[in-house]
Image (cartoon, helix red, strand yellow):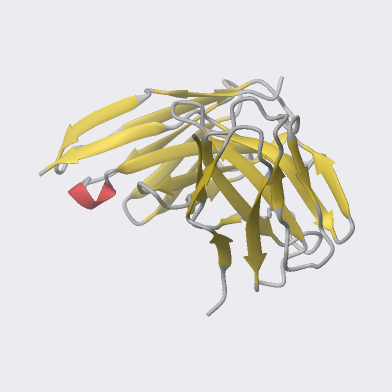
Amino acid sequence: QQQVKQSPQSLIVQKGGIPIINCAYENTAFDYFPWYQQFPGKGPALLIAIRPDVSEKKEGRFTISFNKSAKQFSLHIMDSQPGDSATYFCAARDGSARQLTFGSGTQLTVLP
Amino acid sequence: DGGITQSPKYLFRKEGQNVTLSCEQNLNHDAMYWYRQDPGQGLRLIYYSQIVNDFQKGDIAEGYSVSREKKESFPLTVTSAQKNPTAFYLCASSIEGALPYNEQFFGPGTRLTVL
């Protein structure tokens, strides 16, 4: 099963809040889990990524938490800002096929 | 200025017409990809190419065709056989082989509308 399930579909938080976006997968061949950020009318850009041998990775205000046994990973945005308002996609890479499978996306709105 | 360019930004097509979307990269990347993005469905892979003169079908290749005659170019043709072509099309590229975890870089996209 190649699917990556992402939730919630949309999320609204106040400035300074900590939005959390969750993803789950079934395919144990996935070996790389990136998150992409996309602004309206633009292409996605890599935000942060994690490998399955690591349980957490932080880059600035963005943190990925990874639970290998549960086959789940999540994105946390600390001290969220209105400029973080965008659509966020999780993805997973099948190492043998070298393809990315994307989640359905989460539209985040950070209110000022 | 390195990156991926897609043209045109907006494209309108009449039913029954074939159209070709351009994708060019000067990153010297080996692999290139085409995705389709529809609201609420994320990105779905149409075709990908890991080397020149070779390409593979993705999850939704029906009604589309590609060519890879040059390393830097990977044009996508949306044929009249594609029944619902209105979407946002994204091209991406990545390094192959050297890195175990290849980051995909995306272009700005082409929005295709069928009239």
Asked whether the viewer can see residue A18, the reply is no
Q: Quadrant of residue A52?
A: top right
Q: Nearer the viewer, residue B101 or A83?
A: A83
* Residue A45: image location, x then y, percent: 48, 54
Residue at 77 percent of width and 59 percent of height:
B96
Going by the picture, which residue comes out furthest to the left? Answer: A112
* Residue B108: image location, x then y, percent: 49, 56
Asked whether the viewer can see residue B61, the reply is yes
Going by the picture, which residue comes out furthest to the bottom? Answer: B1
Residue at 81 percent of width and 60 percent of height:
B97
Residue B97 higher or lower than B82, as above or below: below
* Residue B89: image location, x then y, percent: 56, 44
Using residue B103 as the reference point, say whether residue A79 is left or right of it.
Answer: left
Residue at 62 percent of width and 42 percent of height:
B35
Q: Nearer the viewer, residue A47 or B79?
A: B79
Q: Quadrant of residue B62?
A: top right
Residue A96 higher or lower than A46, as above or below: above
* Figure disc tally: 0
Using residue A34 as the reference point, say whether residue B24 is left or right of it.
Answer: right
* Residue B50: image location, x then y, percent: 81, 54
Q: Quadrant of residue B13?
A: top right
Q: Nearer the viewer, residue A33 or A4?
A: A4
